[in-house]
Amino acid sequence: MNIQDYIRDIPDFPKPGILFKDITPLLADHKALVSCVGQLVDLIPKDVKIDKVVGIEARGFIMGSMIAERLEAGFIPVRKKGKLPYDVHSKSYNLEYGDDSLEIHVDAIKAGENVLIHDDVLATGGTAKAVCELVEELGGVVVQCNFIMELSFLNGSAKLGTPASALLKY
């Protein structure tokens, strides 16, 4: 199934000059959603057991949890500051328009666990890199970052320092 057929372009969102890639048509179609999750699982090295899948707020939660179920792995949400209810480990990072902070529960990942990081889109790489650092600071081993799509003209994968894969590249 061609996942591209289920990605809608929204011009000038969230601000003028941005072409937003909307995945809600993909999420609304059961066959497309299941196919996309299967294709994302197929991006993962077959010779590595994944212990945890980390989903990045918020769209990374949707397919990240479905990937975790397929891999028989745990699912870990990484959220913006102040959204998690337990003790957290935080990472601040720079965005093109300011700073932000992400958090993960301090007991979410055990030392040596193999971790897959998932989000819907890889743009500049700042968010994904911060999540990789959070995982590594807890002792996890980032096996791969995977995405539905990559905006390759922004060169975000070069910033990650870990393998990255995407189903679609723009």
Image (cartoon, grey):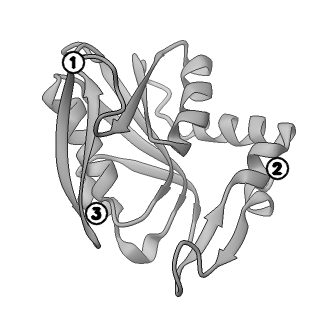
Please give the residue where the numbered disc 3 appears in the rendered image.
158
Name which quarter of the figure residue 63 lies in: top right
In the image, residue 166 sits, relative to residue 131, either above or below, namely below
**Which residue is located at x 44 percent, y 24 percent?**
47
Does residue 170 sit above or below 17 in this rendering? above
Residue 163 on image: x %, y %: 34, 47
| Residue 76 placement: quadrant | top left
In x, y percent, where is residue 119? Answer: 48, 45
Residue in view at x 40 percent, y 50 percent: 164
**Cα–Cα gap, marks 2 and 1:** 42 Å
Q: How many marks?
A: 3
Q: Could you say whether the residue bearing mark 1 is in a helix, strand or loop?
A: loop
- The residue at the point 60 percent across, 81 percent down is 12
Task: Establish if 11 lies above or below 86.
Answer: below
Dot 2 corresponds to which residue? 1
Residues 122 and 99: in front is 99
Label located before the other in sequence (1 or 3)? 1
Identified by mark 2, the residue type is Met
- Of the numbered discs in the image, which one, if any, rests on residue 87? 1
Q: Nearer the viewer, residue 1 or 26?
A: 26
Task: Check residue 11 in the rendering and tell me which mark sits there, or answer none.
Answer: none
What is the crowding at mark 1: few (fewer than 14 residues within 10 Å), some, or many (at least 20)? few
If you read the primary sequence from the N terminus, does the residue marked by circle 3 or circle 2 appear first?
Answer: 2
